[in-house]
Amino acid sequence: MSTTEMHELDRTIDHLRHCVGTLRALYGDAASVRRLSNDLERLEIDARDLDSSPPNVVHREPVERIKV
């Protein structure tokens, strides 16, 4: 993932963290809020994994173009 995409992902996760915090303030320790928090934690773990490992570069064969 490019640096720009990683920054956007981090920004979006930060926004989601804020929203889940607001929901926790409104609903307390409800099961649905706990599940959202768990999902957020998994997103953060996956984002760190992506950031720490280089993407697989796919080499494609040149495409033959046929003039019509």
Image (tube, rainbow, N blue to C red):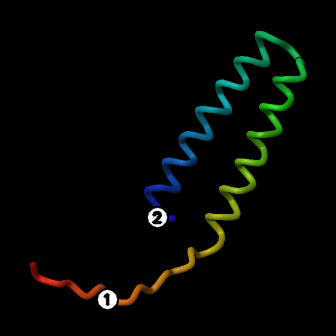
Dot 1 alpha-carbon crowd within 10 angstroms: few under 14, some 14 to 19, many 20 or more:
few
For numbered disc 2, what is the local secondary structure? loop
**Residue furthest left as drawn:** 68
- At x 50%, y 52%, the residue is 7
Tag in front: 1 or 2:
1
Where is residue 52? Give x, y as percent.
65, 69
**Against 56, is 48 above or below?**
above
SS type, badge 1: loop
What residue is shown with label 2? Answer: 2
Q: Which residue is mark 1?
A: 62
Residue type beneath disc 1: Pro
Most extreme residue toward the top, as rendered? 26
For marks 1 and 2 on the same chain, the one whose residue lies earlier in the sequence: 2
| Residue at image point 77% right, 14% down | 25
Q: Could you tell whether 15 is left or right of 2 in the image? A: right
Mark 2: few, some, or many residues within 10 Å (few <14, many ≥20)? few
Q: Which quadrant holds residue 24?
A: top right
Q: Using the image as rendered, state which of residue 18 and residue 5 is in the foreground.
A: 5
